[in-house]
Image (tube, rainbow, N blue to C red):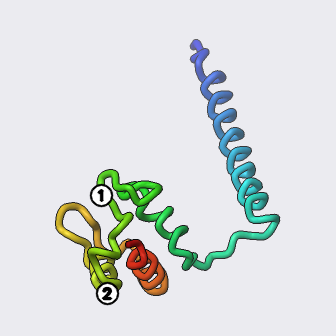
């Protein structure tokens, strides 16, 4: 009975992939610690509107509010009031704006920030 000669190579490849994943996860954790100045990352959500925008809105509205898939927001405060912007963020808008991307304190911060863009 002959043994399959590919089995040792498959085992070595699987072991190599596992080691690579472990090392990369450890490196990612260290990178986060370095970025946070050695402090562990806090689980609290940011209420800085520019950070919230960068995390949730930039892919559609661009990094400078210039618009991409979504509309230009550079002068959105001249078109909508803070309450109207808040309603759009909560309920979405026909044409692709999803509802509920931000809520609570983040919703208040982003709607106030956008309403000041005139």
Residue 16's spot in the image, x, y percent?
68, 33
Residue 112, disc:
none
Taking the spot 60% from the left edge, 23% from the top edge, the residue there is 7
- Judge from the rendering whether residue 8 lies leftward or rightward of residue 4; answer left or right: right
Quadrant location of the N terminus in the rendered image: top right
> Seen in the image, is 102 located left or right of residue 16?
left
Between 94 and 27, the one nearer to me in the picture = 94
- Left or right, 40 with respect to 47, comes to right
Quadrant into which the C terminus falls: bottom left
Above or below, 95 relative to 118: above
Residue name at image x 74 percent, y 59 percent:
35
Residue at (27%, 65%) from the top-left corner? Answer: 97
> Which residue is at the far right?
38
Residue for point 68% across, 28% down: 12
- Please say if 26 is above or below 94: above
Circles 1 and 2 in contact, beta carbons < 8 Å: no
Q: Quadrant of residue 33?
A: bottom right
Q: x%, y% of residue 32?
A: 71, 59
On the rendered structure, is 70 left or right of 117?
left
Q: In x, y percent, where is residue 75?
A: 35, 68
Q: Secondary structure at mark 1?
A: loop
Does dot 2 land on a helix, a strand or a loop?
A: helix
Q: Position of residue 78 (x, y in %)?
A: 31, 75
Height in image: 20 above or below 49?
above
Q: Which residue is mark 1?
A: 70
**Mark 1 closeness class: few <14, some 14–19, many ≥20 residues within 10 Å:** some
Question: Based on the displayed image, in which of its 4 quarters is residue 111 positioned?
Answer: bottom left
Q: Which residue is mark 2?
A: 83
The mark nearer the N terminus, 1 or 2, is 1
């Amino acid at each position: 009975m002959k043994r399959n000669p590919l089995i040792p190579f498959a085992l070595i490849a699987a072991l190599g992939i596992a080691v690579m994943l472990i090392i990369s996860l450890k490196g990612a954790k260290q990178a986060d610690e370095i970025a946070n100045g050695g402090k562990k990352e806090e689980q609290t959500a940011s209420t800085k509107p520019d950070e919230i925008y960068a995390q949730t809105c930039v892919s559609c509205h661009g990094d400078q509010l210039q618009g991409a898939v979504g509309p230009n927001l550079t002068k959105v405060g001249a078109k909508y009031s803070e309450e109207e912007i808040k309603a759009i963020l909560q309920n979405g808008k026909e044409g692709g704006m999803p509802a509920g991307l931000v809520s609570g304190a983040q919703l208040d911060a982003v709607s106030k920030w956008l309403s000041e863009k005139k």
